[in-house]
């Protein structure tokens, strides 16, 4: 059996046929609507290379295993390339991607993007042509990871209502950091609470759910912590060949939970 670090494997993996499917008070926040997504540092690089002979959005999409509309969104600034997509694009273009640096944060508040809803067992159709303006919320910067993007997910369902020491209830808002931004700093380990993305049908349908990670020598398990027995863990075997058409990746690390007190 080939050995490889879970640090890499747990970022993107394929589910095998054996995979099982599925008080802290919220601080004062400032909501800013109609905020634009941070500029993708690779956007200009992609556009310049697509203009070269023999290069096309369709060809790049095929090389990355994406729908062509996803590349169109990158070019138009509505979608950012993920780290593994940057590596794949570099292979397609035949040149190294430009080096980027995170700009140090000097202010006490940073913009956190409201990413969407986490709900175990619910696959939603991905709207590649969604042109709605993202919503951003100003929050205190993460003291441990001040340069990482903060993402907000609203919790729906009861898949984590028995998490210890602090359950996650429907209506809670999860304050997370983008795993892509800190994967070179943070090693995934058992006990971490993470946001997991599962996609199927070539990425046309997506499920976001929050799970607690357990790592073993031959597999990674993403567990619900629920009093509801319908929720099952996602089990990823250490097998590169197994592929049932569903991809799994860790997209965010949960750092804290916010909630509103009733009666207001």
Image (tube, helix red, strand yellow):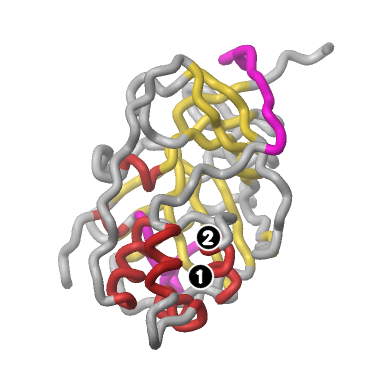
Residue drawn at (62%, 16%), measured in percent from left and top?
Answer: 26
Q: Say if residue 189 shows up in the picture.
A: no
User: Mark 2 Cα within 10 Å, few/some/many (few <14, many 20+)?
Assistant: many
Whether residue 144 is visible here, answered yes or no, is yes
Q: Residue 141 carries which label?
A: none
Residue 63 in magenta?
Answer: no
Residue range of the region highlighted in magenta in the rendering: 11-34
Return the residue at label 1: 246
> Quick check: 233 above or below 188?
below
Per the picture, the main secondary structure of the magenta-coloured stretch is loop
Q: Is 12 one of the magenta-colored residues?
A: yes
Q: Position of residue 4 (x, y in %)?
A: 18, 61
Q: Distance between the residues labelled 2 and 1?
A: 7 Å
Instruction: Please state, as top left, top right, bottom left or bottom right, where the C terminus lies in the image.
Output: top right
Is the C-beta separation of discs 2 and 1 under 8 Å?
yes
Residue found at x 25% / y 44% = 184
- The local crowd at label 1, few if under 14, some if 14 to 19, many if 20 or more residues have their Cα within 10 Å, is some
Name which quarter of the figure residue 242 lies in: bottom left
Viewed as shown, does residue 235 lie left or right of 71? left
Relative to the observer, which residue lies in front, 114 or 174? 114
Residue behind mark 2: 198
Q: Residue at x 60, y 57 (%)?
A: 207
Q: Where is residue 171 in the image (x, y as percent from the top left)?
A: 70, 31
Q: In which quarter of the image is residue 44?
A: bottom left
**SS state under label 2:** strand
Residue 105 x %, y %: 38, 24
């Amino acid at each position: 059996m080939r050995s490889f670090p879970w640090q890499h494997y747990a970022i993107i993996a394929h589910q095998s046929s054996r995979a099982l499917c599925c008080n802290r008070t919220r601080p004062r926040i400032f909501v800013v609507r109609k905020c634009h997504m941070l500029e993708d540092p690779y956007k200009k690089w992609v556009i310049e290379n697509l203009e070269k002979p023999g290069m096309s959005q369709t060809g790049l999409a095929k090389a990355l295993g994406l729908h062509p509309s996803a590349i169109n969104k990158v070019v138009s600034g509505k979608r950012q390339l993920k780290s593994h997509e940057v590596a794949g694009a570099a292979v397609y273009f035949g040149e190294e991607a430009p080096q980027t640096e995170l700009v140090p944060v000097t202010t006490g508040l940073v913009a956190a993007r409201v990413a969407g809803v986490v709900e175990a067992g619910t696959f939603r159709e991905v709207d590649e042509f969604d042109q709605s303006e993202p919503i951003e919320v100003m929050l205190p910067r993460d003291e441990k990871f001040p340069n990482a993007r903060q993402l907000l997910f609203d919790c729906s369902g009861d898949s984590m209502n028995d998490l210890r020491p602090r359950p996650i209830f429907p209506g809670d808002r999860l304050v997370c950091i983008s795993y892509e931004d800190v994967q070179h700093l943070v090693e995934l380990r058992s006990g971490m609470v993470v946001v997991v993305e599962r996609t199927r049908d070539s990425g046309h349908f997506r499920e976001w759910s929050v799970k607690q990670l357990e790592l073993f020598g031959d597999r990674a398990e993403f567990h619900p912590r629920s009093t509801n027995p319908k929720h099952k863990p996602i089990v990823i075997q250490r097998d590169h060949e197994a592929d049932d058409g569903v991809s799994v990746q860790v997209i965010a690390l949960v750092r804290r939970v916010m909630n509103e007190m009733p009666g207001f």
